[in-house]
Amino acid sequence: MKNYVLLLVCLIASSTFAQEDAWVFFADKENVAESIANPISILTQEAIDRKEMHNVVIDERDVPVTESYITEIKNATGINVSAKSKWMNCIYVTGSQMNIENLLDLPFVTSVEYADKSLNFFPEIDRTVNKFEMENTSSRIDYNYGAAANQIEMLKGDFLHEQDFAGQGMIIGVLDAGFPSVNTNPGFANMLSDGRLLGTFDFEQRSTNVDGTSTHGTRTASDMGGFLENQFVGTAPEASYYLFVTEYTPSETPVEEAWWVAALERSDSLGVDVINTSLSYRGYDNSNYDHTYEDLDGQTTFAARGGNIAFEKGMIMVNSAGNGGNSDFPTVGTPADAIGVFTIGAVAPSGNYASFSSKGPTVDGRVKPDVMAQGQDAAVIGTNGGVDFNNGTSFSSPILAGAIACLWQARPEVTNSEIMQLVRESSHLYNNPTNEMGYGIPNFEDAYNELLILGIEDDFLKSNFALYPNPTSDILNISFPQELNKAQFDLYSVLGTKIMSTEISSELNSVSIESLATGIYIATISEGKHQVSFKIVKK
């Protein structure tokens, strides 16, 4: 009998004191209708303009989590709150199982989802969606790519630069483990002097200091935004950037998935176009939290769910496939498995598959990775400002992400899904994808040519305004939808100041911006309830 009593006491103690990680979901939000009716109260103008351009609905998911709910849970016994998600209306907590389950007694809490999946006995969340270790000015841009030549020319990214698409006006969010020396590194001097480093935040430290716990982010960001004259050029050297730390390298816990989703939400609210994430999750310090192959169906993990919502919100999510190709778990991790995430594997400088690159397919049979870029002997800028070479899908991903930003710059009104599909279709294995290479290595010259055709298709022009050329140094031309022949043209600075207002028609459809200063502007064309916004780059 004493043994039974001792066992019972141990079980109670385990339930009382063992720390668990979980997401706590809420029933509702405050001020939803008011916030949606006045979106500038919850989103930046840049984000609103991007959503309008791509017909992305501003909905309840864009409204912040109710702070009074978070405060009440922070005050609950034995509970620590580490992150929050407005898209999924939840917070990430740590506490004993007993204290976490006590939160279900709160009237605004609907469910708890434990990182330890064996503890989950609550109803499934609706997940329906539509289908490191090894990483130690002129009209024609003509870069000396130096050490980065092979990785850019392999994708024909140099062709995009020659067409004057080097990321001007596009915003890229980089989610990684740390960006030490970025503010003093000569490889990022152009970005800083141009004011193109738009913001930073560390979601673990809750600080704008993004040194983090690794040099990894500095190196991945360099493959997009880095520039050393005659030595190195990133794939999007003229884009603007946000740098976000979502990883704490001394440990591996699911809160990093929560921080990652929080960074996606902030990126969306700031108007980010393209996200690069050179991170992948499968195993954790607590093996009870590990993701199995069956979990990686593109819509089950918290990160995959967040990635899919980011896609619905109009961004392009680019993610490294992972470096597990030679391991016992060779398939892609999460969020690389997500349906809405564009997953990038690694090839050698020759274009052949790099054996460390994680493979597909996903458990539900989808092609992953989507496409490939150089990740073996990839050139990077190190924290000391010198050129180095690293291995990993962590580098193939940003190389590809920068190229996508430049391609999208050519026709920013085209949707994220269309851009992603054009890149797939340009790849050399599109008709015969493989588990190792997905659809293969993209050709951005081909993708650009197809994008131009897409932009003038009859069906597109029948129902949409189109504005071209963009970038331009003088004249903007506007093509009209079939059913309209007059409209109002308004031009704004990025700070929202109206600079120009004029009436246009299908016959008088050109506007001169020759007198304006070089920079980025927002054009709004409206006729009654028909309105669309464009991001304009004045050369």
Image: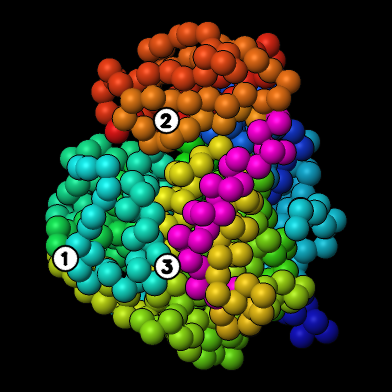
Quarter of the rendering containing residue 94: bottom right
Above or below 406: residue 272: above
Q: Say what secondary structure mark 1 lies in.
A: loop
The residue drawn where x is 71% and y is 31% is 462
- Looking at the image, which is closer to me, 191 or 466? 466
The quadrant of the picture occupied by the C terminus is: top left
The amino acid marked with disc number 3 is Leu
2 or 1: tag closer to the N-terminus: 1
Could you say where residue 233 lies in the image, as x and y percent from the top left? 25, 60
- Looking at the image, which is closer to me, 248 or 57? 57
Above or below 498: residue 21: below
For residue 536, the mark is 2
The amino acid marked with disc number 2 is Ile
- Looking at the image, which is closer to me, 177 or 485? 485
The residue drawn where x is 52% and y is 14% is 508
Residue annotated with mark 3: 155
Mark 2 and mark 1: span between their CA atoms?
A: 30 Å
Could you say where residue 93 lies in the image, as x and y percent from the top left? 59, 52
Q: Is residue 444 magenta?
A: yes
Residue annotated with mark 1: 231
Which residues are drawn in magenta? Answer: 438-463
The residue drawn where x is 41% and y is 11% is 500
Mark 2 and mark 3: span between their CA atoms?
A: 26 Å
Could you say where residue 321 lies in the image, as x and y percent from the top left? 53, 72
The amino acid marked with disc number 1 is Gln
Q: Is residue 301 magenta?
A: no
The residue drawn where x is 27% and y is 69% is 148
